[in-house]
Amino acid sequence: MEIFNIYHIEAARRLPNLPASHPCSRVHGHSFRIEIHVGGPVDPATGWVMDFADLDAAFAPVRAQLDHRYLNDVADLDNPTSERLAQWLWQKLKPALPGLCRIVVQETHQSGCIYAGD
């Protein structure tokens, strides 16, 4: 079974590895939509995979590092593509969420990536 929560952050970034002529090489912002998926068996006593409040608690310190920030200034996010952001989130959340199985990062309503670990 798999559960998920959806979170939103507002953040600015620039993608420094692109040519200067590319619009994303300049500072711009996104309203990122982030899905955190956790999988595992349904506990027979509680009837759930995990408490959504525990998922919120695991995400809270990570959100504080990203929300209303310039992502290029966040440690290990100097090239903050959606792909790198998904990998960064995985590294930060996996210790607190052993059942972490997927992270979805959307940078627009139509564009994003899915990361399921290495």
Image (tube, rainbow, N blue to C red):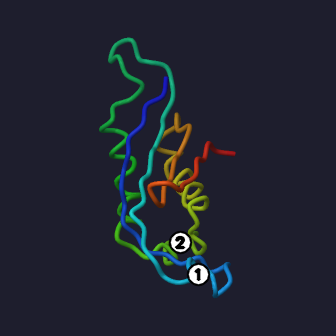
Label for residue 15?
A: none
At 55% from the left edge and 50% from the top edge, which residue is drawn? 90
Residue 93 location (% of width, % of height): 49, 49
Residue 11 against residue 5 in the figure, above or below:
below
Residue at point 58% right, 52% down?
A: 113
- Residue at the spot x=41%, y=17% of the render? 43
In screen coordinates, is 11 left or right of 115?
A: left
What distance separates the C-alpha of mark 2 from that of mark 1? Answer: 19 Å
Label 1: how many Cα within 10 Å (few below 14, some 14–19, many 20+): some
Residue type at the position of mark 1:
Ser
Looking at the rendering, which quadrant does residue 33 occupy? Answer: bottom left
Q: Is mark 2 on a helix, strand or loop?
A: loop
Specify the quadrant of the image occupied by residue 47. top left
Mark 2 highlights which residue?
Answer: 75
Viewer-closest of 4 and 106: 106
Q: Position of residue 106 (x, y in %)?
A: 48, 55
Q: Name the residue under label 1.
A: 25
